[in-house]
Image: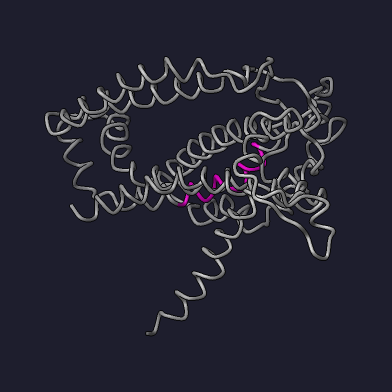
Amino acid sequence: MIILPSIVLLGIFVYGFIAQTMRVSVTDWGQEAAMSLKPEIHHVGSANYRGLFSGFLNMRFRQDLTNMFFFTLLFVGLSLHVGLLLATLIDQLVWGETFFRTVFLYPMSLSLVVTGTIWRWMLQPRGGINVLPTLAGLPAGQFLWLSSREQSLTFDWSHIFHYICLAVLIVLALMAYGHWCQGEKKRLRSKLIICAVLVGILASGVLTRIRLLDYPEEHGFNKALWGVVIAAVWQMSGYTMALYLAGLRTIPDELREAARVDGASKFQIYRYVDLPLLKPITASAIVILGHIALKIFDLIFAMAGPDHYPTSVPAITMFLKTFRGNELAVGSAIGVILLILVSLLIIPYLVNSFSTGER
C-alpha cells in the first residue's frame, strides 16, 4: 500500500504517455488536425514509419540516424578511453589526487546547454581553437568544425539491411570467439552462438536482397560531428573517470601482490589483473553513455542549432516535426524509434544483471 501511489503515478505519467505516443504514431495527426478544434484523426498503420525509412521527403531523418550511430561510437569509445586513462593516472598519484579529481569532474557540474555555448565559441571557424597556432607564429587552423559539410565512410541507404546483417554477424562471431577462449564452461554457449551465426548467414542472404529505396541514397559520417563529440567527451569523461577510479580502489591488493610474486610487471598487472576486474564498470559505463548519446538533444541544439543538418540527430528532427511543423504523428513515430533503440541497449544489460545476480 505504501508504494501504490508511486506505481499509479508511474503507470499514468510514464507508461501511459508511452502508450499514447505509440497510438498517435500510427495515425495521420498532421498539420491540419493539429490546428483544428475538432481534428479528424484516422488510423494509418505503419505509414509514418515507412515514410521515415523509405520516404523521399525524410532523407534528413535517415542522415540523423547515421549521425547518431557515429556519434554514439565516438562518444562512448573516447569517453571510456579518456576516463580510464585519467583514472589510471590519478590512481598512481602520490599527491594532488583531490585537486585533479575535482578538476576532471568539474565539467559534469555544467549543464549541456552551457557546455554547448562555450564550445560553440571555441570552435568558430575563424576564432577559438583555430587561432591557437598563431600564438606560436604558425598559420591559423582551417578546420571548419561545426560548419563542415564533408562526409566520409559513406554507404548506400538502399542496402541498409546488408550492413545491419554484416554488423550482427561480426558481433556474434566476436561473442563466440570470446566465449570459446574462456574455457570449457563457455564452450556450449559458444557453439550455440556459432549456430546463430550460421542461421544469420542464411537469413542475410534473403535480407540483403531487400532494397528500401529504388534509387541510391548516400549517407555517411559528417566531419562537423567532431566538434560535438569533443564537447561531449570533455563533459562526460570525468564521470567515466570517477567510475573507473572507484573500480580500481575496490581491487584487493592481495591480487596485485600475488601477481608480483609470480614475476608480473606493472603493465602485466594492469593488463591481466586490473582491466579484467573492471569489465562490470565498463559495461555499466557503456549503457549510461550510450543512453545519453541516443537521446542527445540540448548539446547539439546549443552548439549548432536545430536547422544545421550535418550535426542533426533524431531528437532534433522530432522536435522540429512536432513543435515547428505540427506533424504530431511523425514526431511520435520518431519518439517510438528512439525508445526502441534505447531499449535495445538497456534491456540486455538488465537481463544479464538479473541473471548474474541470481547465480
Give the tally of numbered discs.
Answer: 0
- The residue positioned 77% from the left and 47% from the top of the image is 320
Q: Which residue is nearer to you in this view: 282 or 262? A: 282
| Magenta stretch encompasses residue 235 | yes
Which region of the structure is painted magenta? 229-242
- The structure's colour scheme is one colour
Residue 217, given in percent of the width and then of the height, sits at 69, 19
Q: Which residue is nearer to you in this view: 271 or 295? A: 295
For this view, does 36 lie left or right of residue 170? right
Residue 300, given in percent of the width and then of the height, sits at 72, 44
For this view, does 258 lie left or right of residue 168? left
- The residue positioned 63% from the left and 30% from the top of the image is 66
Q: Which residue is nearer to you in this view: 171 or 12? A: 12
- The residue positioned 54% from the left and 65% from the top of the image is 16
The image quarter containing residue 136 is: top right
Residue 241, given in percent of the width and then of the height, sits at 48, 47
Q: Which residue is nearer to you in this view: 182 or 218? A: 218
Q: Which quadrant holds the N terminus?
A: bottom left
Query: Dominant secondary structure of the magenta stretch?
Result: helix
| Magenta stretch encompasses residue 219 | no
For this view, does 60 lie left or right of residue 11? right
For this view, does 98 lie left or right of residue 226? left
Q: In the picture shown, does residue 321 fall above or below 13?
A: above
Q: In the picture shown, does residue 118 fall above or below 64?
A: below
- The residue positioned 11% from the left and 29% from the top of the image is 184
Residue 94, given in percent of the width and then of the height, sits at 42, 48
Which residue is the extreme one toward the right?
A: 126
Which residue is the extreme one toward the bottom?
A: 1
